[in-house]
Amino acid sequence: MRFGDCELDQARRELRRGGALVPVEPQVFDLLCHLIRHRDRVVTRDDMIDGVWGGRIVSESTLSSRINAARRAIGDSGEAQAMIRTIARRGLRFVAEVTEDAAAPAAITAPRQEVRFCRAPDGVTLAVASAGEGPVLLRAGTWLSHVEHDWASPLFAPMLRRLAARNRLVRYDIRGCGLSDHEPAEISFDAFRRDFEAVAATIEAPRFALIGASQGAALAIDFAARHPDRVTKLVVTGGFARGRNRRGQTQEREKAQAILTLMRQGWGDPRSAFMQMFSALYVPRSSPEQLHWWIAAQRATTSAEAAVRIREVIDEIDVTALLPQVRAPALVLHARGDSVAPFEEGRLIAAGISGARFVELDSDNHVVLEGEPAWPRLAAEVESFLAA
């Protein structure tokens, strides 16, 4: 659909102004879509909360910031109100003329999911989401996560949809990220471990499968080793048992420090040196849309300060001693050209877990993307393993 000098593509979740792609946080994009979809009437505060936040409690400051961000994204302002007009004491109305493409594809909707909250032993609130039906599959938390926004991400959603199609997929946001508490007093691997156990305690099924990607692999390995009675299977994708500072390589330590230095200055900024390095490491083969969402994920999930604290913990992870204690059948998949978790780290995990099956993927991406040659094999291997 088009309005002013803007073009909004709901299926691809892209906003362009003057032909240029505009980075927009997921909630802001959803708010724009909601206002445009109901442009024939005034949209009240309650309407916005129901349509964008699913009825959850939202502060006035959060709502105001999202409205202001939506206006900025389309070149409007609270003073001009040329497109989004405030109707005093009633709400908002989208007043710009909209032209819809006759053949525009329908917007992609997320599977129906339930979001609840649980508390870690130290009182930190954790957001826990479940979607799908079937055997329970618990996904270990990672630092770039948002249990709602991830469903719209071209980076993460394709695999999440595959997993939820055959399982009851349980996910959560780690402390400091997503819908979980953003400013916890403690951020440490021990805290992440306690959080994972708190989430697992909410699952009624006595036993379930685990999946861990990136640093989530270490949490999944830790839990599987400590709670063998609860784990039926373990899947590791692009994982590592040792953080950069624990790999015994000066180059890895230097890389860790470089990332932290640039992260403090450029988190969520598409023009920063950090984003150039970050995207080159994590998704070097990404499309413009996928790269856009990589940036949006940073903005939506956590602050630069929290991201640095979390990364400092990740760089010190070492669960190699626990690998021989994992008794569950394990599948380890790793991209040959992964620059975040070197290929050798995947081999180390598979070699350390008795009987683990190792699958090498032909990709340079840390997150294997839908549409690249390695994707069909990744999806098929994971589905086959979990179904067996």
Image (cartoon, rainbow, N blue to C red):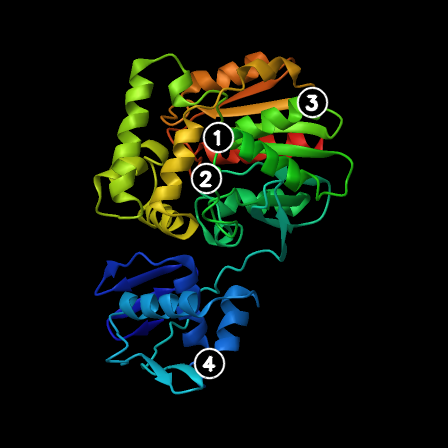
Q: Tell me, yes or no, whether the two marked residues, 1 and 2, touch with CB atoms within 8 Å.
A: yes
- Mark pair 3, 4: CA separation: 52 Å
Upstream in the sequence, badge 4 or badge 2?
A: 4
Q: Does label 3 or label 1 sit earlier along the sequence?
A: 1
Nearer to us: label 4 or label 2: 2
How far apart in space, not on screen, are marks 1 and 2 (Cα)? 8 Å
Which residue is labeled 3 in the image? 328
Where does the image place residue 235, in percent across and percent down from the top left?
60, 29
Q: In this view, does 168 lie to the left or right of 10?
A: right
Local secondary structure at mark 3: loop
- Closer to us: 61 or 109: 61
Residue on which the image places disc 2: 143
The three-letter code of the residue at mark 3 reads Ala
Query: Residue drawn at (42%, 65%), measured in percent from left and top?
Result: 62
Q: Earlier in the sequence, mark 3 or mark 4?
A: 4
Label 2 crowd (10 A; few <14 / some 14-19 / many >=20): many
**Image position of 107 with respect to 212: above or below:** below
Give the mark nearer the N terminus: 3 vs 2.
Answer: 2
**Horizontal and vertical percent position of residue 308:** 36, 37
- Mark 4 neighbour class, 10 Å CA radius: few under 14, some 14 to 19, many 20 or more: many
Label 3 with label 1: CB-CB less than 8 Å: no
Residue corresponding to mark 4: 43
